[in-house]
Amino acid sequence: MTRPTRPARPTRDARPTRQARPTRDARPTRQARQARPAFVRPIAPMMATRAAALPSGAEWSYEVKWDGYRAQAAKNGDAVLLASRNLKDITRQFPSVAAAVSRLDAATALVDGEIVALDASGRPSFQALHHWSVEGLSLVYYAFDLLHLNGRDLTRRPLDERRAALRDVVDDSGVLLSDALPGTPSQIADAVRALGLEGVVAKKRRSTYAAGRRSDAWVKVRFAQHQELVIGGYKPSAAAFDSLIVGYYDGAKLLCAGKVRNGFTPAARAQIFVALHDLETPRCPFANLPSSRSSHWGEGITAEEMSALRWVKPTLVAEVSFAEWTRDGSLRHAAFIGLRDDKPARDVRRE
């Protein structure tokens, strides 16, 4: 019997060769890797200091203070995220704004601005933001700052440079540019008052973006007195409520600032009443109630009056207009403007 012969060993040329490693020139370069823009996320916003009058000087520029929702818009390719002042995701609430942001001329960008509801005459209406689709108003996003662009962090660049880049990015996207206003501070103040707008923000042209800080490089002046206040109770009526009991925090104490009776639309009154019902509590949250007596203007709340009130957990924040603060720390002629779900109740202080 003949033995089976072994198969011949493959020659060196016939053996499978190892796959060649890419040469240094064929590998992605550091520059190519860095060319991919980093994913951008909203950051804690820079905030303005309140003042009674506009500062003057060549180092300052001036913008309209829009009466809307402060919001940052992050674009990452086709993905868009809108974030409120306290970094809450509000993208689904404002789909038309998200669509405009998606058309920004940038691969990635982080924009700071304000979501504003405009009435038929083009005036902002904060109260209408809650019902803009029902009332048929237009919703726009005014951009006033650019914080990141295509992988570059611009927060350490001067404001004028960020503004110039923002103009190119906004282009024809549908996002509106909040332009610097021409003229002297007094001319600007007169013009903004005449248009019935809320106020003006003055910003230092060379200022960097101080994330999460209230900076004196940005100064806001309101021409109508506004105050954010925490709702801590209400006086019930047959159908809903007659007035809201509101206040502000001084340290850990919630201090009552009086009653708000005016300014409620039927829709707003119904919305607030539903929210109040779910927050009811037997305990009064205000540290300074009852008042020793009702003031000359009727803002105080006595022990007798408290028996007719209902208390709620202090979580809802309302924006209120008013004529003045009284000497005993109450609001005079207060009127409701709208609910603020973009600010935590614990952050509300007397301005």
Image: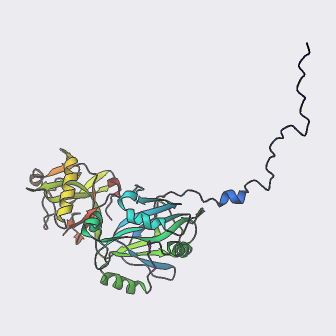
Seen in the picture, residue 161 relative to 187 is either above or below; the reply is: above
Q: In which image quadrant can residue 140 be found?
A: bottom left
Taking the spot 27% from the left edge, 53% from the top edge, the residue there is 254
Q: Which scheme is used to colour this image of the protein? A: rainbow
Q: Position of residue 326 (x, y in %)?
A: 21, 67
Q: In which image quadrant can residue 9 be found?
A: top right
Q: Position of residue 183 (x, y in %)?
A: 43, 87
In terms of secondary structure, what is the magenta stretch mainly? loop
Seen in the picture, residue 249 relative to 324 is either above or below; the reply is: above
Q: Residue extending furthest front?
A: 1
Q: Position of residue 257 (x, y in %)?
A: 23, 60
Res 90 visible = no
Taking the spot 53% from the left edge, 60% from the top edge, the residue there is 77
Quadrant of the rendering where the C terminus is positioned: bottom left
Left-right relation of 230 to 173: left
Check residue 97 for magenta coloring: no
Res 124 visible = yes
Left-right relation of 318 to 262: right
Seen in the picture, residue 90 relative to 115 is either above or below; the reply is: above
Q: How many marks?
A: 0
Comparing 194 with 22, the one in front is 22
Magenta stretch, residue numbers: 174-183
Taking the spot 75% from the left edge, 53% from the top edge, the residue there is 27
Q: Position of residue 1 (x, y in %)?
A: 91, 12
Q: Residue extending furthest top?
A: 1
Taking the spot 38% from the left edge, 87% from the top edge, the residue there is 187
Left-right relation of 50 to 314: right
